[in-house]
Image (spheres, rainbow, N blue to C red):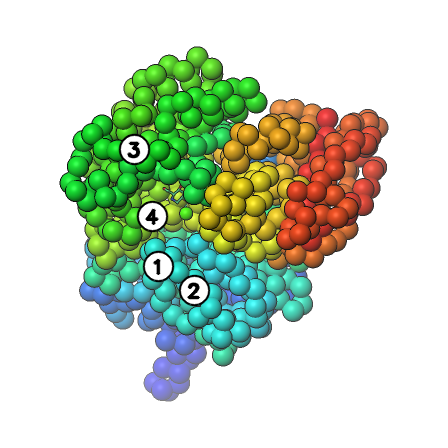
Amino acid sequence: MQKNYYLTFILLLLVFTVKAQTITSPDKNLTLKFALAANGVPTYQLTYKQKPVIKTSKLGIETKDVPSFLDGFTVTKTEQQSFNESWNPVWGEQKTIRNNYNELLVTLAQKTVKDRYIRIRFRLFNDGLGFRYEFPSQPNLNYFIIKEEHTQFALAGDHKAFWLPGDFDTQEYETVTSKLSEVRGKMKAAVTPNVSQTTFSPTGLQTPLMMKSQDGLYINIHEAALVDYSCMSLNLDDKNFVLESFLTPDAIGDKGYMQAPTQTPWRTVIVSDKAGDVLLSKLVYNLNEPTKFKDVSWIKPVKYVGVWWEMITGKSTWAYTDLENVQLGITDYSKTKPNGKHGANTANVKKYIDFAAKNGFDAVLVEGWNEGWEDWFGKTKDYVFDFVTPYPDFDVKELHRYAASKGVKIIMHHETSGSVRNYERHLDTAYKFMVENGYNAVKSGYVGQIIPRGEHHYGQWLVNHYLYAVTKAADYKIMVNAHEAIRPTGLARTYPNLIGNEAARGTEYESFGGNTPDHTTILPFTRLIGGPMDYTPGIFQTKISAYNPENNSFVHTTLAKQLALYVTMYSPLQMAADLPETYEKFADAFQFIKDVAVDWDESYALEAEPGDYITLARKAKGKNEWYIGSITDENARVATVTFGYLPKGKTFEATIYADGKDASFDKNPQSYSIRKMKVSSKTVLKQQVAPGGGFAISVK
Ligand code: NOJ
Ligand code: CA
């Protein structure tokens, strides 16, 4: 009798503990199941229209000092709620974003380990899942150190993946397209050299990771609201197709310093049977907090030109003098011999300001204006730049006056040389200097190994620094565009002065040997999922040797595709990266860059397939103007452009900037044609696209 009682109790316990909790998405397409497996291990699974997206996968966190949050759990409480709101971003691809989800909050106690509890919060949207671990304030949990997060994503098959090698320091790799089972074999070749890089596994991958299943599901795994935590990479078990979180360690190998109450970032899985839905998903933003900024009137989208491409191509230099002078210990630059190629000189900057003013640009970026550029690259020196001392030929006050008189802003440049310690020493003074001299935006950069030495670009310490730099900038009403920083995770919802990031191979690589023609057909599915990229399109002079005879690189797109990128690569910060003299030669095509909006009311994915092609249409914010961009990879194709988003019964004039009949990215990139046609909501346009080509359309 006693025994039977006991058995019944055990059975009841089992039934109780393994009983799954289920929620569905508002449209019922997605189903999430949470359950405890044997030993009280938390698990979850996800389906989309009955197809498996994530098979039963474990959840848990391994700690260093206190018992781990891996097993021994019982469910003490489950709560469900629904949420539905709309919000208006300060800038974006659409003026109103719907945030609609069903939530499951599971409280898990670990009585056998120690009397303490955690929570796992799941939010199921129509476009996917977000979940995170939460550590409420409680007597038995205060400080803890994370050894590893063990969040699994068990995939349903050997999907086609668009992947970057997992790395703690850089995302500036070419995306590899392969089956998951091929990752290991392709890893070595994928890891191309970079001045700072740290790979961790032969099957390590970065997020956002884009995949396509054999049964036609588009699946994207990333994270949202990465705050005070390490960046999550993924390690692939290539026998079973299980991805598992792999956090970036700090200098002593620890992966996260935590204090309750706290939480992890959201782990996100976007899924749809239409690729275009992934492009338009706002799930990552929705999982971020609304902005706390009371006044956002100072945050404005920016279209800019810059003293930049001329240095990237090697036509001119960031440095004022040559290295020998600095090696001799000369620090008084007015006594050094100029190298005669310094781009950021007052006269040249004025030329760009004139060009910006004449063509309606908001700003001019100037790099190489401050002392130190002779001697820093790859050297990991503690103190290189002070961010306030100009070279002798860059007249800060005169340029402030001149730019203001023309209604143009100058964008400040802070290359930290990876010495974040030195940057933080100077940050306040540097921002004050900006305000005094009329700058309201900074492009920062983190090239090279991080100082403090041993820290990684994507570790918790740096994640905290990047956000510190952004929030501190907000105190000064400064907008930030950070290069080589952590890839975005939707934080721009909360901190909308974060108007740009790099964190992938930008256009600069076209001058360093080239990006593959499919590169920009992938980035919107990967890098752009968390926020905009300062991709810097607009290169019309596709042969770099025209600027620097020693540089044989060429741009791997047609000229018309460069125009399309202003629409397909969404950013509130868009550069016209080529030189003014080149734009003057191609004034008719340049007209599109002058016209195109950088902020939108609505966006429409007309055609999309990662790695192959993208056709997007967008309505300019507050205007009856539409812009369409279409790009292809190395294969020519015929795009189908529909106009159903135009107001019914009206006719508009469309200007089509297309590839010439004989155009191709490698043989004839500068061949283009411009034509006009009348369009209405019923028009269907078939447009030929050249290999590595594209087209852009403005509709007014
Ligand atoms: C790399 C950045 O991506 C590029 O835009 C910048 O010009 C250089 N670093 C120099 O800071
Ligand atoms: Ca870079």
Task: Name the element at disc 3.
Answer: loop
Beta carbon at label 4 within 8 Å of ligand 1: yes
> 540 left or right of 7?
right
Measured in 3D between alpha carbons, the distance from the residue under mark 4 to the one under mark 2, in whole angstroms, is 18 Å
Q: Is residue 239 visible?
A: yes
Contact between marks 4 and 3 (CB within 8 A): the answer is no
Q: Secondary structure at mark 2?
A: loop
Look at discs 3 and 2 and give the one toward the viewer.
Answer: 3
Name the mark on residue 338.
Answer: 3
Instruction: Say whether residue 381 is left or right of residue 572.
Output: left
Q: Quadrant of the C terminus?
A: top right
Q: In the rendered structure, are the residues bearing label 2 and label 1 in contact, judged by CB atoms less than 8 Å apart?
A: yes
Q: CA distance from mark 4 to mark 3?
A: 25 Å
* Residue extending farthest top: 405
Residue 224 visible, this orientation: no
Between disc 1 and disc 3, whose residue precedes? 1
Q: Amino acid at mark 4?
A: Val
Residue type beneath disc 2: Val
Assess disc 1: are there few (<14), some (14-19) or many (≥20) residues with their C-alpha within 10 Å of its C-alpha.
Answer: many
User: x%, y% of residue 373?
Assistant: 29, 40
Residue that label 2 marks? 191
| Amino acid type, label 3 | Pro
Earlier in the chain: of badge 3 and badge 2, it is: 2
Q: Which quadrant of the rendered structure holds the N terminus? A: bottom left
What residue is rendered at 61% in x and 48% in y? 557
Residue that mark 4 sits on: 447
Judged left or right of residue 604, residue 509 is left
